[in-house]
Amino acid sequence: MLNQNKKSIALLLAIFLSANSLIIIPAQAQDNPEEEKESILDLQNQIQDKAGQIDEIQDKIAAYEKEVGNLQNKAATLKGHINILDSQINRTEDEVNLLNSEIQQKELEIKKLALDINLTQKEIDKKLEEIEVILQEINSLDEDYLGSEEAESRGIIDIVINFFKIIIKYNSWAEYEKTVEDTSTINDILKQKRDKLGDLQANLEADKKMAENKMAELTDKRKEMENKQQVLAGEKTAKKEILSQTQANEEKYEALLEKAAAAQRALNQEVVTLKEEVRKKIATLQEGAQNLNAILTWPIPYRRITSTFHDPSYPYRRYFEHNAIDISCPQGTPIYAPAAGYAARTRNAGYGYNYITLIHTEKLQTRYGHVSAFAVQEGAFVKAGQIIGYTGGMPGTPGAGYFTTGPHLHFEVHIGTDEVNSASGQTYTHWEATNPLQYLP
């Protein structure tokens, strides 16, 4: 009976010793468990303090968001433009501070988890030592029991010698017999310690998984911080550029707006003049590419829209509508063709407004503004998902134009419909900018 119990317990111990060899996140902790617990409590307090700071910064950001919205609803003037940029700069600086606080909070959470893991590992080691002590006791009891049987088989002298050995060890023969009878109690104790060890191991694995998730979140926050710092630099550059372009003169600002409006009218007219090119090129499209009802894919792997289609808060509406959605993204993000087609225009205006126009069918065109670099030549056929260029929008960089305030993609969708000229009776294609979100999943 004792041998069977010993073997099963030894097997159980081996299993837990194997589990104990898992990789543990290292923690620089004190040897004193009480000091470690105090350190964990101190970290928890620091984490709560950071949470309070984050709430305060979020309130400030919300206030700046409201201020920017109010300013954007006013007519475009140089002074208003500068005020918008100042408010955006203040908001973005607070967003950077927010991300910095969130990063510090994540670092504290990871540090706390490392201490938690270290303490749990020590508890596991302690339980393993306790199990080992019990196993040694069972081994000793087993040896005494076998020694008694062996002595009995050899003769009376060996029996007497072994009897006195047991008396010396257990104080009395009755105590030895009671110990033998209490084997089931020892097994119960072992079971309790095994269950506790299992709980500790589960907690350890949960904490390690949480630490891995926190590390991934920290990496994402640091990337977001880099992007936000890039946006902040762009907004500061935008203010500097617009003041340089206008020399702080309102009339020169008006002239710049008129120039931008003329460029927008030319772009709208270009959609119409591409009609004949569409007819010539449409036959080269791959089978299935002319399905107008097909859903377009997103041209970049980002979804945050900073300016909507015909945005009512667009400050330049008295000059031209915002016939697109602006999608926030890091400078230099690849632009993917949302459907098969051909590159009708690849406009490179240097540091002016760069764009790409794709023709998908006789009734569907898409355009991509603030392109910093091109990956397709004008007239070339493109497959769905092919990289056609790279995003820009950072003020003072190639393709950004005059009025951009930060890196993003300007994405337009134009739909053609057949209409009949009432005077001539001839059918023609009427092109109109449409909300891209109607064609995106």
Image (cartoon, rainbow, N blue to C red):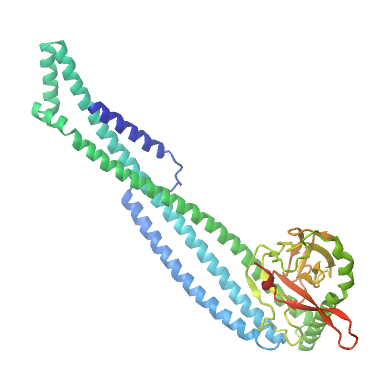
205 to the left or right of 233: left
Residue at 71%, 86% (x, y): give it: 76
**Residue 435 percent across, percent down from the top left:** 70, 76
**Residue 9 percent across, percent down from the top left:** 30, 33
131 to the left or right of 246: left
Q: Give the residue at the far front of this rendering.
A: 425
Residue at 46%, 51% (x, y): give it: 209
**Residue 417 percent across, percent down from the top left:** 79, 77
Quadrant in which the C terminus appears: bottom right
In this picture, is 160 found above or below 233? above
> As rendered, which of 239 and 261 lies closer to the eye?
261
| The image quarter in which residue 275 lies | bottom right
Task: Give the tally of numbered discs.
Answer: 0
Residue 142 seen: yes
Quadrant in which the N terminus appears: top left
Residue 274 seen: no
Residue at 35%, 47% (x, y): give it: 200
